[in-house]
């Protein structure tokens, strides 16, 4: 009988706890629990699904969706950390489940090849408007080489400069 009473009191305490949690508190708990999986998925989306980055990174409620140069600067600041978290997750997964992990990595490499195989940099696209261009520019300059990116403002848009300036402006000699 005392065991039944103990279970009933535990259930009553659980009911009080659930009643005490408001919807906002429950949402906060869920967001905290889902934060690390969200970071992992954003890192994976950056390198494997950049066309769907808007949905994964910004439509989940963790961040507001920046546009233009602010979007580019957001990924310049925080993108590499997401990719490293994704890589750490893959490393941990492979160390725990070697066979399955290597099969997973094989599939991810196929997706990586599918996304990046025919990619061609187009410097006439403003920074921050195409996530594929953004990831490529950041990976080849800021994230991996620690080099700066030459940027030119034309009207309300910012462009990456390479060997040539944007939209037929004068040639830039980089000797």
Image: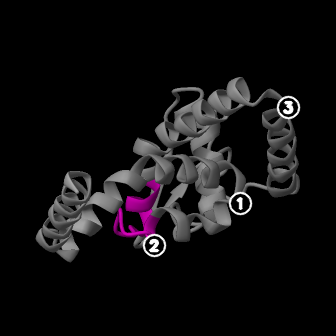
Name the foreground residue: 107 vs 55: 107
Q: CA distance from mark 2 to mark 1?
A: 27 Å
Q: Earlier in the sequence, mark 3 or mark 1?
A: 3
Q: Nearer the viewer, mark 3 or mark 1?
A: 3
Residue 64 locus on image (x, y percent): 34, 68
Q: Quadrant of residue 25?
A: bottom left
Q: Nearer the viewer, mark 2 or mark 1?
A: 2
Residue 168 in sight in this render? no
Q: CA distance from mark 2 to mark 3?
A: 34 Å
Q: Which residues are magenta?
A: 58-72
Residue at the disc numbered 3: 99
In percent of the image, x 19 and y 59: which residue is there? Answer: 5
The residue positioned farthest toward the front in the image shown: 1
Secondary structure beneath disc 2? Answer: loop
Q: Which mark is drawn over residue 7?
A: none
Secondary structure beneath disc 1? Answer: loop
Label 3 crowding class (10 Å Cα cut-off): few <14, some 14-19, many 20+?
few
Residue at the disc numbered 2: 59
Residue at the disc numbered 1: 122
In percent of the image, x 44 and y 67: which residue is there? Answer: 58
Name the foreground residue: 77 vs 83: 83
Residue 169 locus on image (x, y percent): 60, 61
Secondary structure beneath disc 3? Answer: helix
Q: Quadrant of the N terminus?
A: bottom left
Residue 155 locus on image (x, y percent): 42, 72
In percent of the image, x 55 and y 33: which residue is there? Answer: 84
Residue 133 in sight in this render? yes
Magenta highlight: main SS: loop
């Amino acid at each position: 009988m005392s065991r039944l009473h103990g279970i009933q009191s535990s259930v009553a305490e659980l009911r009080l706890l659930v009643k005490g949690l408001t919807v906002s508190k429950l949402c906060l708990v869920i967001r905290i629990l889902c934060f690390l999986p969200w970071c992992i998925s954003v890192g994976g989306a950056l390198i494997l699904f950049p066309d769907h980055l808007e949905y994964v990174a910004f439509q989940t409620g963790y961040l507001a969706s920046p546009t233009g140069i602010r979007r580019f600067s957001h990924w310049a600041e925080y993108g590499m950390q997401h990719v490293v978290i994704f890589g750490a997750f893959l490393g941990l997964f492979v160390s725990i489940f070697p066979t399955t992990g290597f099969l997973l990595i094989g599939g991810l490499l196929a997706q990586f090849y599918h996304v990046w195989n025919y990619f061609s940099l187009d410097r006439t696209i403003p920074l921050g408007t195409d996530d594929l261009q953004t990831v490529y520019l950041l990976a080849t300059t800021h994230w991996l080489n620690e080099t700066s990116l030459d940027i030119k403002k034309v009207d309300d848009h910012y462009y990456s400069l390479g060997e040539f300036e944007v939209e037929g402006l004068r040639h830039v000699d980089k000797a």
